[in-house]
Image (spheres, rainbow, N blue to C red):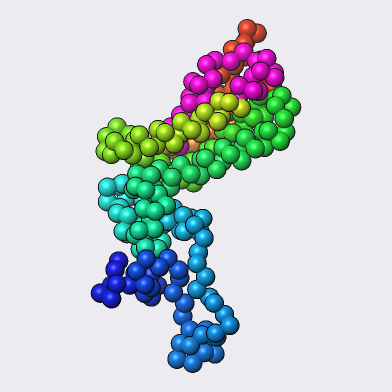
Amino acid sequence: MPDPTGGVARPDGARGRAGDDRPVVAALPGSHDGEMANSVDVRSRRSSSTVRELVLQAARELFDGRPYEEVGTREIATRAGVTHALVFRHFGTKANLFVEAAFQPFRDFVTSYLDQWVLEGHGSSGSAHYTETFVHGLYRLLLDNRPLLVAMAGQSGGGSTELRERAAAFLQEIFERLERESELEIEVKRTVVMDIRCAVRFSFGLVYGITLLDPLLFHDASSAPSRETIAEEMSGFVLRGTLLRTEGLADPG
């Protein structure tokens, strides 16, 4: 938070000039009375990507276990060690920041997944391979980010209208990318499947729902299936649910 001299508080208690997003540097070893070697400029400006990542990480830490309404952007800025103005410069609104903090890892995962799919070439592997890779990777990712996803789910039926609309738009862009690549795969392999828009969303919704409800679905830890088993069963469920086959439930590899 601001200090009386107009400086900006840093996480370590040091102060910098208002509007300055550069780190405050302590005296170098061997210097006298805080003097630094003139030949070394250690107050280099941080890149935009570094600032964004600092803010996103701070937001994830603060939103972990706390309601959306209780976390303010000034608190996030202080936690990240940047000015409040920089938070809005990079994200625009608190809703944008929260959505990116919650779903950016999902977008990164999908980007990596699709890049690998394109590299291997459509039709080069069986449907089971792509489905298992997607479901296993998505399940691990959502488990790692579960607290934020729980908070997001809590806003879906009420709370901030802006947050819901921003989250829907963010996910829509990701779903459309998955749809386009899936349609190319279907065209190459001439596979008969359900409506691809539904297939993409149902697949995500299944893994998302299992992640959120995990403590309720498998309450007895002694008899609960392992994470690996859950991922394998979800993969089979998605694979057989999306493919329309006249020969029954034979392995669609």
State whether residue 187 appears in this view: yes
Percent x, y for residue 138? 54, 37
Vertical position of residue 200 compared to residue 134: above or below: above
Query: Please, what is the dominant secondary structure of the magenta stretch?
Result: helix
Specify start and end residues of the magenta stretch as a single range: 182-211
The residue lying furthest to the bottom in this view is 32
Q: On the picture, is 243 further left or further right than 54?
A: right
**Picture quadrant of residue 7:** bottom left
Percent x, y for residue 112? 61, 41
Q: Is residue 20 magenta?
A: no
State whether residue 155 appears in this view: no
Residue at image location 40% in from the left, 49% down from the top: 91
Percent x, y for residue 141? 52, 42
**Picture quadrant of residue 228:** top right
Vertical position of residue 53 compared to residue 224: above or below: below
Q: On the picture, is 201 further left or further right than 126?
A: left
